[in-house]
Image: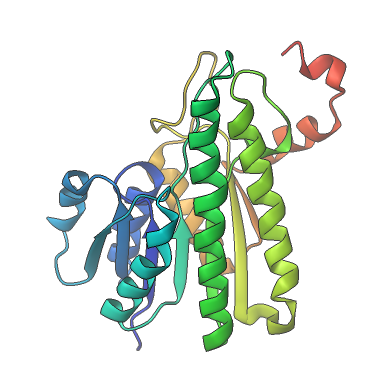
Amino acid sequence: MKMKKAIIIGATSGIGKSLAELLLHEGFEVGVTGRREELFQSIKIQETSRIVFKKMDVQDLSTLEAICNELVSQMGGLDLLIISAGIGEENKNLNFDVEHSVIKTNIQGFTCIADWAVRYFKEQGYGHLVNISSIAGIRGNGIAPSYNATKAYQINYLEGLRINVKEYGSSITITDVRPGFVDTAMAKGEGLFWVAPVQKAAEQIFEAIKEKKQVLYITKRWKLIALLLRIIPFSILKRI
């Protein structure tokens, strides 16, 4: 049986790291990227023969496609690409440097990698793109405006990509993972609830990959919150 090959963008911590470990356990060959090579060592120590690491800064757009091509060449192919690189900062004072950094990662870097993956999958006739967006993308947020807005962009862009590859049927899958709160460094602020363990989040994502789901909420109960967010009037939202 052919070994499945996956690349995870942003795999040195959080959901990305947990997914790398899970895919290795499931027999995948895994290429991982991250800015901090020292954090990669905790994965590499566990598996040396089926994992490849490339240092990547998602904001350095001029290098992204070359790094992805290097990983594919080294691994000998690609079946699955997961984008788990994302940032978000509280920025009530609207410091543009903060907003710009979020935009460069969550929009520019995301788009560059997603487009590269879809072009690659079109050329070979199959493949699976997964992106970790957020339930935050459903509505705006006054404390972290750029985070919610960039996640809304990702949600809509992924929908556009599904339309773009529609002639490929089920051969090319685009999965949008929309977490609520997951126990990672990204979960900031007070009053957090329904916080999912990272391992549980990774397991649910892997199940969605196997089932070729288009949209996944983590955990599943957050689908109810998503529905409420869509229908709640702005007059109420702005007081939350």
Q: Toward which corner of the image does residue 212 lie, by quadrant?
A: bottom right
Which residue is rendered at x = 43% and y = 50% of the image? 202
Colour convention of the picture: rainbow
Q: Where is residue 176 in the image (x, y as percent from the top left)?
A: 61, 55
Q: Position of residue 21 (x, y in %)?
A: 29, 56
Which residue is rendered at x = 67% and y = 19% of the image? 142
Which residue is rendered at x = 68% and y = 66% of the image? 161
Q: Where is residue 233 in the image (x, y as percent from the top left)?
A: 87, 23
Q: Toward which corner of the image does residue 239 lie, by quadrant?
A: top right
Residue 197 seen in render: yes
**Along the viewing direction, whichever of 59 and 144 lies nearer the viewer:** 59
104 with respect to 43 (left or right) = right
Q: Height in image: 61 above or below 179?
A: below
Residue 28 seen in render: no
Q: How many numbered badges does the structure rendering display?
A: 0
Q: Height in image: 65 above or below 75?
A: above
Q: Height in image: 168 above or below 84?
A: below
Q: Height in image: 192 above or below 3?
A: above
Location of the N terminus by quadrant is bottom left
Q: Position of residue 43 (x, y in %)?
A: 20, 53
Which residue is rendered at x = 57% and y = 57% of the image? 111
92 with respect to 76 (left or right) = right
Location of the C terminus by quadrant is top right
